[in-house]
Image (cartoon, rainbow, N blue to C red):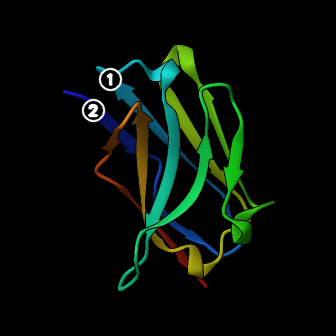
Amino acid sequence: QVQLVESGGGLVQAGESLRLSCTASRITFGACTMAWYRQAPGKQRELVATITSGGTTNYADSLKGRFTISRVNTKNTVYLQMNNLRPEDTAVYYCNAHLFLNDYWGQGTQVTVSS
């Protein structure tokens, strides 16, 4: 069974940084398009960033310049570097792996940004 395990969330103050990690197992990680999503209380889950197997990245327009997605295939891990965090970035952040027609999700990691 495919497993995605996120880590790195926590409570930070506005302006600080966090790096989230997601490590995958039981999947051909190098072939996956990986993504980060987030869901704030009372809101729909939204796409944060994606990175293809070839390393092409894409970001939500509102997050460009502050967030950076990257991957290390030898570690089966995708990262999300989040800089200059704002209170509105508070959400549960989810890792997603897309392979062929299948989507797999992690359990989520909470990020809370205080003002």
Residue beneath label 1, please?
25
Residue 97 location in percent, x, y? Answer: 42, 38
Residue 25 sits in quarter: top left
Residue beneath label 2, please?
3
Residue at (42% x, 45% y) in the render: 96
Q: As displayed, is residue 56 above or below residue 64?
A: above
Give the SS element for disc 2: strand
Furthest-right residue in this view: 65
Q: Local crowd at mark 1 within 10 Å, few (<14), some, or many (≥20)?
A: some
Q: Amino acid at mark 1?
A: Ser
Q: Local crowd at mark 2 within 10 Å, few (<14), some, or many (≥20)?
A: some
Q: Give the number of marks.
A: 2
Residue at (67% x, 25% y) in the render: 54
Q: As displayed, is residue 13 above or below residue 67?
A: below
Q: Amino acid at mark 2?
A: Gln
Is 10 left, or right, of 42 in this rendering?
Answer: right
Asked whether the residues under the numbered discs 1 and 2 touch, taking CB atoms below 8 Å apart as contact, a structural biologist would say yes
Residue 15 sits in quarter: bottom right
